[in-house]
Amino acid sequence: MPDDDNTPVLVARARRGEAAAFEALVRRHLRPAYAIALAIVTRPSDAEDVAQEAMMIACQRIDTCRDPERFSAWLFQIVRNHARNWLARRRLRDVSRDPAPPEPVHGGPEPDAGAFRGQLVAALAQLGEVEREIVLLHDLDGWTHPEIADALGISVVMSRQHLFQARRRLRTEFTPVAMGERA
Amino acid sequence: MSDERIDLSALDPARDAERWERRIREVVAGAMLARRWTVSGQLSSWARPALALAAAAALFSWVGLVIYAAPLDGSAAGTAAAAQQDRSLTLSSWAATNEQPSAGSLLSVLGGE
């Protein structure tokens, strides 16, 4: 899912301007980029916009990716920077206006999907940024601990510890309905 | 327990597959557009110095021509040009016929005494 043997090849092809290579990179990395953005901006719709824009920036600057084997780590740094800028602008905007309206729910079949999602977002907001990144990459995007550790520049043990803490805190913050017993 | 996966699918942006697909297409299209801009930008960034260099070379040649041609009046310049042409023709004919010129002829053609 994240960087594998094929990623440097895709980066090289993208540098030559091959649309198929760009598409493969975007398909593979847009969702993890969203996870990282969500860990910072904490609003799903904002995170989608941030991920999209950051992915676009990464594609434009792909020639500056020095280590294509660690494309994810490089992309995540762009996403983090973009998300922090976004957050700063949003804070200014929110001060001058009313608080943001409730998040729209896309593709949620249940009538209470919006409320459920809101509770989940609120519970995630109680975690630290790194914990959010790890729990989202692992439980939303299916990354393994070695993959997370490599992309975030931490040890596998730290990744496991952060995930353990994040899950424990989420279970404390949130109703049991959400924690795996809902699906 | 804490080692069980938490269901975060409510936050999955790909749940609305059509919308997510549209986002992917927008990023790819934007990337390709930006890439074209970058390529043309790189070309223009190379073209500008190349043009400047060519202009400078042209200017130097023109200045050189003016400096060296200035002392000659019209007829002298014509004579010099004709002599230069003769020299070129002689050298070309030697090269074409494989003829070995004498030292005197060579000096004479190349402007020696």
Image: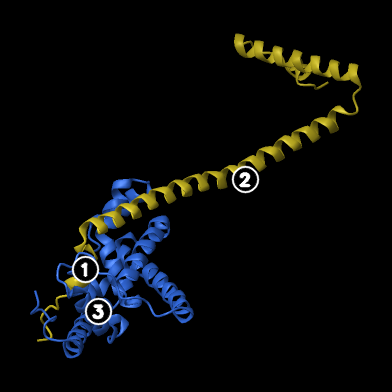
Chain colours: A blue, B yellow
- Quick check: A95 left or right of A180? right
The circle drawn on residue A118 is 3
Assess disc 1: are there few (<14), some (14-19) or many (≥20) residues with their C-alpha within 10 Å of its C-alpha: some
Question: What chain is tagged by disc 2?
Answer: B
Q: Position of residue A35 (x, y in %)?
A: 27, 71
Asked whether A56 or B51 is in front, the reply is: A56
Nearer the camera: disc 3 or disc 2? 3
Assess disc 2: are there few (<14), some (14-19) or many (≥20) residues with their C-alpha within 10 Å of its C-alpha: few
- Label 1: state its secondary structure: loop
Please identify the quarter of the rendering in which residue A2 is found: bottom left
Q: Which residue is mark 1?
A: B12
Disc 2/disc 1 C-alpha distance (Å): 50 Å
Nearer the camera: disc 1 or disc 3? 3
- Quick check: A67 left or right of A135? right
Q: Is residue A174 above or below residue A81?
A: below
Nearer the camera: disc 2 or disc 1? 1
Q: Which residue is mark 2?
A: B49
User: Which quadrant would the C terminus of chain A be assigned to in this image?
Assistant: bottom left
- Please report the residue visible at 66 percent of the width from the left and 10 percent of the height from the top: B93
Asked whether A139 or A50 is in front, the reply is: A50
Q: Position of residue A62 (x, y in %)?
A: 39, 57
